[in-house]
Amino acid sequence: MSQTTHFVLPQSEIPTHWYNVLADVPEPLPPPLHPGTRQPVSLADMLAIFPQNIVEQEMTAEQRIEIPQPVRDIYALWRPTPLLRAVRLEKALQTPAHIYYKFEGASPAGSHKPNSAVPQAYYNKLAGTKRLATETGAGQWGSSLAMACQMFGLECVVYMVKVSFHQKPYRKMLMQTWGATVHASPSEQTEYGRKMRQQSPDSPGSLGIAISEAIEDTVKTPHTKYALGSVLNHVCLHQTVIGQESLKQMDLAGEYPDVVIGCVGGGSNFAGIAFPFVERKIKQKKSTRIVAVEPSVCASLTKGEHRYDFGDTAEMTPLMMMHTLGHQFVPPAIHAGGLRYHGMAPAVSHLYKLGLIEAKSYAQSQVFEAAVQFARAEGIVPAPESSHAVRAAIDEAIAARQDKQKRTILFNLSGHGLMDMTAYDSYLSGKLID
């Protein structure tokens, strides 16, 4: 096979700044509102759960934010991540399309999540925080924050959505290996968790419930702050190292994508690969299609409403202008636990409203069919969340075959699935249902 399939950057090419897409959008993002007064939140309002340096990033209008050297030093453990061309998959599909994927599963935690976990732990350490509380869906964020807290000497407590706590025991063990305390949510640790367990003893849990528990823990425990793994502006900001590296790697490949694809739940990995390409779309009038792919049973972009809503079920967070299925919505217990969220990042929702990105959704049987096809061709087993992007990329390649037109496809393979094998077992044994 003569084609170059790996496009690897030296460590000197780790991005020096994060990119803030909100500085370039033609219409400003509506501000979050205080849950009590319904007035725009101030910096002071946010200090109960976040340190000031994180809040300043959340509210910044700056286009480029410098990445601190201690964060870049830790990024260098795995960044820049490789960009690969899926030549074997192209051959299996008999497509004229060129398929590229950015492999974020190369990180120690196996996903893109450390891109934000490391700076969040760093900024909290600077601010004097001793302990971080958080939620996690599939466990990717919880394990990443556990690792980051270990690196900066912080305590970490994780409220893990109950269905994933039982479906993905090895992610729980990974968090514990990195020193975190992990509770199945809804839990007995918080007043809200106990209330939810009493109301619905068999609840599979949800990210909305787990967020409420983590915030309650934060406000009731001294020297504790909250860390969120998706949705908020500063999290999307941190993830843009993915897209910035991808732009340079596509230059190495001598191509520019016709379509950029990412799976989407709360929005962080999609923002990471998409936002730097959105900048090119805004400023250079590039015609690239940018596609967010969500599960059909939790499709906030394609089925939700664009309005103000709470980020959690207990109505403790500010109200955010986002695509939402309603903050009381508890998604079915699909295996893509990281995508089981009722709302979408306000920044991603805003780009969708402005027509700068598009969205589609798939049922989980379609997603696992694509994941197995990809694994058998390329050797990498994708996480169930990332497999939504794989599905869309394969469909784009099939469309290119049918149209007999070459197109260049780039997708974010946001994590490996080596701790999700019970999900693959369900699919391969015919037990997976939509």
Image (cartoon, grey):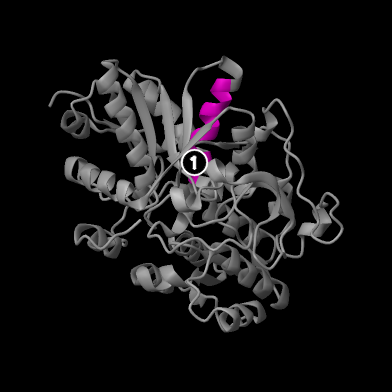
Q: Is residue 428 visible?
A: yes
122 on left or right of 221? left
Query: What is the x, y in percent for residue 429?
Result: 19, 62
Q: Quadrant of residue 346?
A: top right
- Taking the spot 34% from the left edge, 18% from the top edge, the residue there is 254
Up-down relation of residue 104 to residue 38 (above or below): above
Q: Amino acid at mark 1?
A: Phe
- Taking the spot 64% from the left edge, 59% from the top edge, the residue there is 327
Q: Is residue 130 visible?
A: no
How crowded pointer 1 is (Cα within 10 Å; few <14, some 14-19, many 20+) is rated as: many
**Residue tagged by mark 1?**
270
**Which region shows up in magenta?**
269-281
Up-down relation of residue 275 to residue 432 (above or below): above
Up-down relation of residue 336 to residue 259 (above or below): below
Numbered circles on residues, count: 1
274 falls in the magenta region: yes
- Taking the spot 84% from the left edge, 62% from the top edge, the residue there is 36
Up-down relation of residue 280 to residue 346 (above or below): above
**Main secondary-structure element of the magenta-colored stretch:** helix
Which one is nearer the viewer's eye here, 54 or 357? 357
198 falls in the magenta region: no
* The C terminus: image quadrant: bottom left
Which one is nearer the viewer's eye here, 44 or 12? 44
Q: Quadrant of residue 403?
A: top left
